[in-house]
Image: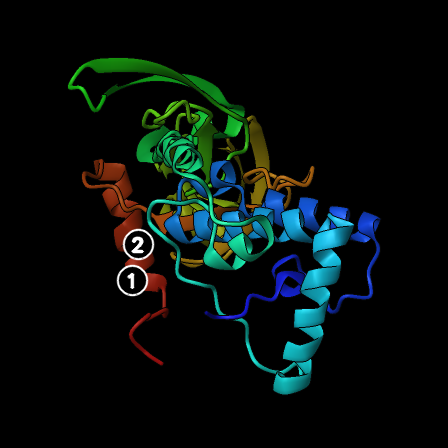
Amino acid sequence: MIFKDYYKILGLENNKVNNEQIKIAFREQAKKYHPDVNGGNARTEERFKDINEAYRVLSNSSTKRKYDRMWNTHVAKKQAKQEYQESKRDKDSIFSDFFNMFFGVPTETNQENNTNIKKKNPIKGENVETEINVGIEDAYYGTEKKISLRTVNGKMKTFSVKIPEGIRDGEKIRLLGQGKQGSNGGKNGDMFIKINIQNNNKFKLQGYDVVTDLFLTPWEAALGKRVNIDSIDDTVSLYVPPGIQSGEKIRIAQKGYKDGRGSRGDLVAEVKTVVPKRLTEDEKELFEKLKNISTFNPRNK
């Protein structure tokens, strides 16, 4: 039979503890390893049984004294350095052989009751994950979307999902109790919905920054100009300096996406110089004149 260190199971360093300390340690460990918290994990269920077993022995002054004599002998032999090992359990009982040293072997009736208790342990249902696409402007302002999913029994179910304003790309929304059904009276699992923010033709999200195109004519890029440019929530007046190059970026502070801390990223305007596909006779004449008088050659280094 493998010795079970009930003090280690409850997270206590030694047996120099009073009943109140044992009770506090039991509550902390029971909360951590409770089956409802761990979704029916087999290993945590076994650990939870050990925790209850340890508390039953150590909370009783008589059984604690008996156990402490064994514990002191064990510590002396192993020098308090040997890792504790969990005992193998009888499949027909929820209590270990080590525990039965203190309370005796259960009767046939008790074994039947224990088996029934084990069978009726509530098990939480599995969580379900899915994802939906949300436009960048809807994500910025917040919105409500309806999604339809097929349940485990093959039926379609519609959920209303509230998208909070300023949600991050890849962030998950949790719908409590909308996962798979629990068993033996256990709670239903939860549904986690991953949000994918979709860019559009006007705006592109990069972190907290919003990138947009700033289209300029060749003469606007050469001479400079004040232009109006749209952000997500308003229109910004922007000064374009003379000689700006296609591909350069101008930042407008605090006009980007919400950062969740009461501030915003930047609006990033990327310059794209656009040449007219068709020229009027006057425009063509002016371009010909510019070609003849200009010494500028972009291919010269």
Q: Is residue 202 visible?
A: no
Question: Residue at the spot x=42%, y=50% of the render?
Answer: 271
> Is residue 124 depicted above or below 240 in this figure?
above
Label 2 is placed on what type of residue?
A: Lys
Q: Residue 285: x and y, percent?
A: 26, 46
Instruction: Tell me the element at label 2.
Output: helix
Q: Which of 147 and 51 is in front in this view?
A: 51
Residue 159 percent across, percent down from the top left:
35, 16
Residue for badge 2: 289
261 relative position to 159: left or right: right
- Crowding near the residue tagged with mark 1, few <14, some 14–19, many ≥20 C-alpha atoms within 10 Å: few
Name the residue rendered at 64%, 47% in the picture: 56
Residue 16: percent from the left, percent from the top?
82, 66
Q: Which amino acid does label 1 sit on?
A: Asn
Q: Which residue is drawn at 18% across and 19% down?
A: 153
Count of picture labels: 2
> Does residue 129 lie above or below 219 as drawn?
above
Among the 4 quarters of the image, the one containing residue 236: top right
Residue 125: assigned label:
none
* CA–CA distance in space, label 2 to label 1: 5 Å
